[in-house]
Image: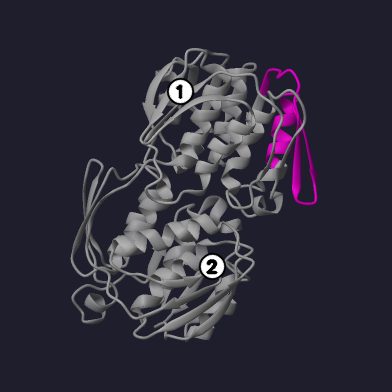
């Protein structure tokens, strides 16, 4: 899909979409709960669909009506008793979180289960499973650290050491799975990145009745415990809202209201508010909404190690600042849907914005944005960042824009609803 974005003045109000990070964690916990859980405001993104497909492949009974999902779980015990049997393969689509989170969960079962995916996920590393899961009695085979990967459990309780510097998603899956391993375990973690995402995991688990003792997110004491079915609502997504907030800071003279965002469950990307404040953006922050006004943008410095998904919207914000901005944590971007640091550098250069990458920092040099054709590189956040350049700067043509369906399918519709000038052209095959 090709999308044309034109300079626009945004106005109105919009509700942020549901958090895909929280929704996927809810599905994993509901899969392990004996009984039926009900999850409302479930997002329609590709990653969230992948989580449902995985849970169903593992034997969950799922009924979805609109944004309400009913999921009957009990994995692995109802399954080992022969009531329901998992398929021998699960497919994670392009979802890095679902892939890494559900592997330890699948390994609770005693039969071999193949984990597969497609697209950009096939280029993302799963090597960490080969060193950790065997310590817990799980056999692991992979394609040199990449999907497809096969696990054969069951996981047994134990004490393991995990390097948290590459991804917190594997640790999330391990923490969710271990309470059902039949005993107590201890997980030691060094150099943990994205700590707010682990706090999110623990908070979602608590909502399903499972509490893990932790010491500064470096040591986790996991006791044998049962997940209990719940009725929950998925809160709004700060990751998706960040693009709307930044666009408003550049294009909403009369203010733009973004609702359905709160702090009930930790979301790392709520830190976007801190950056907007640093950049001098005029805002009204309410308990579950933010109104943002177009402002003169001051250059800023920000450490994004705990929230690497903020790099694309913040790079777009920095393109319109009054000086050079610096964002730290570039090494966290290598294993995303694209090598996101280099992709931002390459694509923003087409629009006259110079980005310099050095060691672990990104410097963004503002300049008049010129018309450009951007390749989204199958990366939803690149497509949305390019949209900001078009709304606030000059006409942008975004190729491969359909990738926004991974996290925010209605993104371009919402931009148009907010008076953004959007022209969409489907690819035509001859």
Quarter-of-image position of residue 257: top left
Q: Which mark is residue 216?
A: 2
Quarter-of-image position of residue 313: top right
- Can residue 33 be seen from the camera position used here? yes
Secondary structure of the residue carrying tag 2 is: loop
User: In x, y percent, where is residue 296?
Assistant: 64, 19
Secondary structure of the residue carrying tag 1 is: helix
In the rendered image, residue 360 lying in the magenta stretch gets the answer: yes
Crowd class of label 2 (few under 14; some 14 to 19; many from 20; radius 10 Å): few
Q: Image height check: is 103 above or below 153?
A: above
Upstream in sequence: badge 2 or badge 1 = 2
Q: Start and end of the magenta stretch?
A: 343-372
In the rendered image, residue 137 lying in the magenta stretch gets the answer: no
Residue depicted at x 46% and y 40%: 238
Q: CA distance from mark 2 to mark 1?
A: 40 Å
Residue depicted at x 57% and y 45%: 309
Q: Is residue 112 left or right of residue 333?
A: left
Q: Which mark is residue 415?
A: 1
What count of labels does the image hold?
A: 2
Residue depicted at x 55% and y 20%: 4
User: In x, y percent, where is residue 357?
Assistant: 78, 43
Q: Is residue 392 left or right of residue 158?
A: right
Give whichever of 61, 273 is nearer the camera: 273
């Amino acid at each position: 899909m090709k999308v044309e974005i034109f300079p626009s003045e945004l106005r109105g109000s919009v509700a942020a979409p549901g958090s895909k990070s929280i929704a996927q964690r809810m599905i994993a916990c509901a899969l392990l709960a004996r009984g039926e859980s009900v999850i409302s405001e479930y997002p329609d993104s590709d990653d969230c669909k992948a989580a449902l497909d995985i849970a169903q492949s593992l034997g969950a009974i799922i009924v979805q009506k609109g944004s309400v999902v009913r999921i009957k779980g009990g994995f692995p015990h109802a399954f080992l008793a022969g009531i329901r049997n998992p398929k021998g393969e699960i497919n994670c689509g392009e979802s890095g979180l679902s892939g890494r989170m559900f592997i330890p969960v699948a390994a609770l079962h005693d039969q071999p289960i193949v984990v597969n995916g497609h697209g950009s996920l096939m280029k993302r590393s799963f090597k960490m499973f080969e060193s950790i899961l065997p310590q817990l009695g799980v056999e692991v085979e992979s394609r040199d650290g990449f999907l497809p990967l096969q696990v054969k459990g069951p996981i047994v309780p134990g004490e393991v050491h995990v390097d948290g510097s590459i991804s917190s998603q594997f640790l999330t899956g391990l923490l969710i799975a271990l309470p059902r391993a039949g005993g107590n375990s201890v997980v030691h973690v060094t150099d943990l990145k994205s700590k707010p995402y682990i706090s999110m995991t623990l908070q979602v688990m608590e909502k399903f009745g499972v509490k893990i003792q932790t010491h500064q997110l470096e040591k986790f004491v996991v006791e044998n415990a049962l997940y209990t079915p719940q009725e929950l609502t998925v809160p709004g997504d700060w990751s998706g809202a960040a693009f709307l907030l930044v666009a408003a800071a550049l294009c909403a003279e009369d203010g733009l209201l973004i609702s359905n965002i709160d702090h009930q469950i930790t979301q790392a990307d709520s830190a976007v508010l801190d950056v907007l404040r640093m950049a001098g953006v005029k805002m009204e922050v309410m308990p579950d909404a933010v109104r943002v006004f177009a402002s003169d943008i001051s250059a800023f410095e920000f450490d994004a190690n705990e929230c690497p998904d903020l790099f694309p919207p913040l790079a777009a914000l920095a393109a319109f600042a009054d000086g050079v901005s610096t964002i730290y944590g570039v090494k966290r971007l290598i294993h995303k849907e694209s090598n996101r640091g280099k992709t931002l550098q390459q694509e923003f250069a087409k629009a006259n914005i110079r980005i310099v990458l050095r060691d672990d920092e990104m410097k963004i040099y503002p300049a008049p944005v010129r018309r450009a054709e951007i390749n989204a590189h199958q990366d939803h956040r690149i497509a949305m960042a390019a949209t900001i350049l078009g709304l606030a700067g000059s006409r942008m043509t975004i190729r491969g824009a359909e990738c926004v369906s991974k996290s925010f399918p209605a993104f371009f519709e919402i931009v148009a609803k907010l008076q953004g000038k959007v022209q969409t052209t489907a690819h035509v095959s001859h």
